[in-house]
Amino acid sequence: MSKLKFSLITLILLVLSSFMPIVQIYILYINGALISVFMNSDDKIYCLINLVASIFMLGLFYFSNITSAKVVSILGFLLFFIPLILYAADKLIDANKYYWIQFLVADLIAGIIVVALEITKSKLQNMKF
């Protein structure tokens, strides 16, 4: 359980902050600034860059043993994954009435992925071959 501490804290903070999405708005602005360097206006390239970068950050999280590397890789994962989910589900939810639902769904998906990856890593390390 002590290894899951960082993942669970990340999940709880994301879910709590989705009702007043200041953190998520900063994530979207930073992501837009980073991605604008690599693309002009093609939506497929935007999704591809975010997908590749979030998978790369998840790989870094999985193989890191140092806490600071885990923090940096999770922040990088959130920086690329949350905008990807929000962009993919843009037309599904009316953002005028229920703006917080899309942030809540994206944060839950990201948090569950992080927790599941940490559980998988700890179970694989505890298995004896």
Image: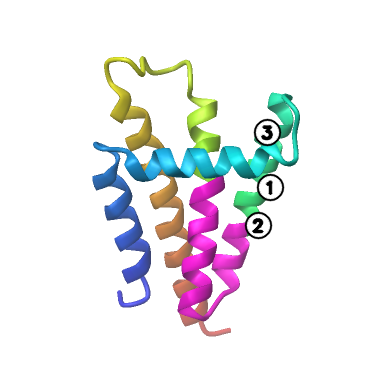
Q: CA distance from mark 1 to mark 3?
A: 10 Å
Secondary structure predominantly adopted by residues drawn in magenta: helix
Tell me which residue sits at (46%, 68%) in the image. 71
Q: Which residues are magenta?
A: 57-80
Name which residue type carries label 2.
Phe
Element under disc 1: helix
Of 12 and 117, the residue lying toward us: 12
Q: Which residue is mark 2?
A: 56
Q: In the picture, residue 17 is in which quadrant? A: top left
Image quadrant where one finds the N terminus = bottom left
Q: Is residue 56 above or below residue 85?
A: below
Mark earlier in primary sequence (1, 3): 3
Of 29 and 103, the residue lying toward us: 29
Image quadrant where one finds the C terminus = bottom right
Q: Is residue 57 above or below residue 35?
A: below
Q: Nearer the viewer, mark 2 or mark 3?
A: 3
Element under disc 2: helix
Name which residue type carries label 1.
Val
Q: Is residue 91 left or right of residue 40?
A: left
Q: Which residue is mark 1?
A: 52
| Residue occupying the far bottom of the picture | 128
Name which residue type carries label 3.
Tyr
Tell me which residue sits at (60%, 58%) in the image. 57
Element under disc 3: helix
